[in-house]
Amino acid sequence: MEPWTIKHFSQANPSGTGQADVPALLRRVADSIESLGPVEVQDLVMHTEVTADGPWPSLTVYFHDAEA
């Protein structure tokens, strides 16, 4: 079995007005994934933090470079 490392990043909307906008978050994450180039996404995990401004969702994306 060959070892390999999974990469990841987390992203949220800016805090304040609109921080709970999940469709906007999904668009931001999609743009970020596209900017990575050819990758294979293994998992998406959504978290929600409760703040004084209300819920603040974030997504963690786990991916690896696409095979040539």
Image: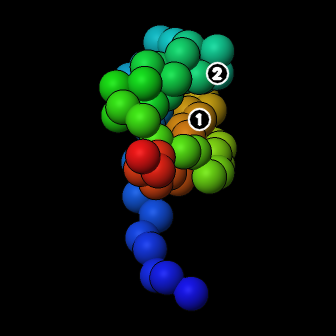
Residue nearest the viewer, comparing 64 with 22: 64
Q: Quadrant of the N terminus?
A: bottom right
Q: Is residue 4 left or right of residue 61?
A: left
Q: Count of labels shown?
A: 2
Q: Earlier in the sequence, mark 1 or mark 2?
A: 2
Residue at 47% x, 50% y is 67
Task: Point out residue 66 in the picture as x, y percentages from the top left corner.
Answer: 47, 46
Q: Secondary structure at mark 1?
A: strand
Judged from this view, the residue extending furthest toward the bottom is 1
- Dot 1 corresponds to which residue? 57
| Number of other residues with Cα within 10 Å of mark 1, as a class: few under 14, some 14 to 19, many 20 or more | some
Q: Secondary structure at mark 2?
A: helix
Q: Type of residue at label 1?
A: Pro
- Dot 2 corresponds to which residue? 22
Residue 68 shows up from this direction: yes
Residue at 63% x, 46% y is 44
Residue 15 shows up from this direction: no
- Please report contact status of discs 1 and 2: CB closer than 8 Å, yes or no: yes
Task: Point out residue 26 in the picture as x, y percentages from the top left corner.
Answer: 59, 22
Residue at 59% x, 35% y is 57
Residue at 41% x, 58% y is 7
